[in-house]
Image (spheres, helix red, strand yellow):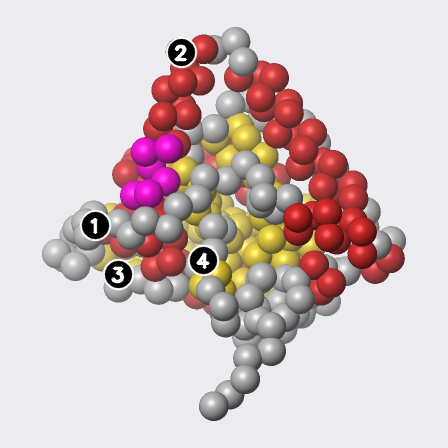
């Protein structure tokens, strides 16, 4: 059904102000920080981080004061996301956990990438950053987080293996490799004592895609030599030309409190690839 997406639907999706209509964006460059957990945020996301914090904080404060409109606004966002999914012939998001907001974002708008539609839910007060796009290419990823506390949900695309037809049959070493690549992308920090502790298959999305829920932990070694214990849960699948993961992490101390929320984020993750090429007309760049 997705391969028969009409040009009209595709144009309507791109014509909206954002594919991820609920994300907070800014191109403001951040000042430097020595916080190790902040450095774990991919470079392109960091460029927009401080520009988005003010807007998100204001929105959270307003919601806290008004209280009443939170539920209707949440319902409107979910309806908007589901309308876009329906236009693409994709399954609607189910019930979003209380205190969460839905996100729908098109990754791969640049000529250097292939398009993927990323969908998940995140806490309302988390700041969202998305890839930056210039004339020739796209950089960065889709991420949500409370960065000052080290809580993040980050989308990662692993292209080395290409498409993996039966991801549920892959050995533990496969997921270790994917997730170590994910946590080390564009970061100056050193990681050690990485360990996958559990792998559980699940189904969801279009035609019951397979998603592997993977628990893991590691130590982040800061530039000053401090070791920060981190725990995470990821959802890993393979769509299109690559393997995709949404990994949700925090410090080991905060994980005790945040684990249910991080699992909700990972469980809500869906990614789609079929029929999206017409949404992203690739620019032909003349070489001089």
Q: Is residue 229 left or right of residue 208?
A: left
Q: CA distance from mark 1 to mark 3?
A: 18 Å
Residue at the left extreme, as displayed: 224
Q: What residue is shown with label 3?
A: 189
Label located before the other in sequence (4 or 3): 4
Q: What residue is shown with label 4?
A: 132
Q: CA distance from mark 3 to mark 2?
A: 39 Å
> Looking at the image, which is closer to me, 209 or 58?
58
Label located before the other in sequence (1 or 3): 1
**Vertical arrangement, residue 62 with respect to residue 35, above or below:** above
> Looking at the image, which is closer to me, 254 or 141?
141
Q: CA distance from mark 1 to mark 4?
A: 18 Å
Q: CA distance from mark 1 to mark 2?
A: 30 Å
User: Is label 4 in a helix, a strand or a loop?
Assistant: strand
Q: Can you tell which quarter of the image residue 22 is in?
A: top right
**Vertical arrangement, residue 226 with respect to residue 166, above or below:** above
The span picked out in magenta is 50-55
Crowd class of label 1 (few under 14; some 14 to 19; many from 20; radius 10 Å):
few
Q: Which mark is residue 65?
A: 2
Q: Is residue 286 left or right of residue 64?
A: right
Callout 1 touching callout 4 (CB < 8 Å): no
Q: Can you tell which quarter of the image residue 58 is in?
A: top left
Q: What residue is shown with label 1?
A: 31
User: Is label 2 in a helix, a strand or a loop?
Assistant: helix
Q: CA distance from mark 4 to mark 3?
A: 23 Å
User: Is label 3 in a helix, a strand or a loop?
Assistant: loop
**Vertical arrangement, residue 101 with respect to residue 279, above or below:** above
In percent of width and height, residue 257 lies at 39, 28
Residue drawn at (87%, 57%), measured in percent from left and top?
4
In percent of width and height, residue 64 lies at 41, 15
């Amino acid at each position: 059904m997705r391969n028969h997406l009409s040009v009209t639907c595709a144009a309507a999706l791109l014509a909206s102000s954002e594919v991820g209509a609920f994300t907070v964006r800014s191109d403001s460059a951040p000042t430097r920080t020595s916080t190790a957990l902040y450095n774990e945020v991919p470079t392109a996301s960091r460029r927009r981080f401080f520009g988005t914090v003010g807007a998100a904080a204001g929105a959270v404060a307003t919601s806290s004061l008004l209280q009443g409109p939170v539920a209707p606004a949440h319902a409107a966002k979910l309806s908007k996301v589901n309308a876009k999914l329906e236009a693409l012939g994709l399954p609607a998001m189910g019930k979003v956990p209380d205190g969460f907001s839905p996100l729908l974002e098109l990754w791969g708008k640049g000529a250097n990438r292939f398009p993927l539609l990323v969908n998940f839910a995140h806490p309302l007060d988390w700041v969202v950053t998305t890839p930056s796009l210039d004339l020739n290419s796209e950089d960065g990823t889709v991420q949500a987080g409370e960065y000052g506390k080290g809580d993040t949900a980050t989308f990662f695309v692993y292209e080395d293996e290409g498409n993996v037809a039966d991801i549920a049959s892959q050995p533990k070493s496969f997921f270790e490799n994917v997730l170590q690549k994910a946590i080390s992308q564009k970061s100056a920090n050193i990681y050690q004592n990485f360990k996958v502790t559990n792998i559980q298959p699940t189904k969801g999305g279009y035609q019951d895609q397979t998603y592997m829920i993977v628990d893991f932990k590691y130590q982040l070694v800061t530039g000053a030599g401090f070791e920060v214990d981190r725990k995470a849960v990821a959802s890993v699948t393979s769509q299109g030309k690559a393997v995709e993961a949404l990994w949700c992490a925090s410090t080991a101390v905060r994980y005790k409190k945040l684990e249910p929320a991080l699992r909700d984020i990972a469980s809500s993750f869906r990614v789609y690839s079929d029929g999206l090429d017409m949404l992203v007309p690739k620019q032909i760049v003349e070489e001089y």
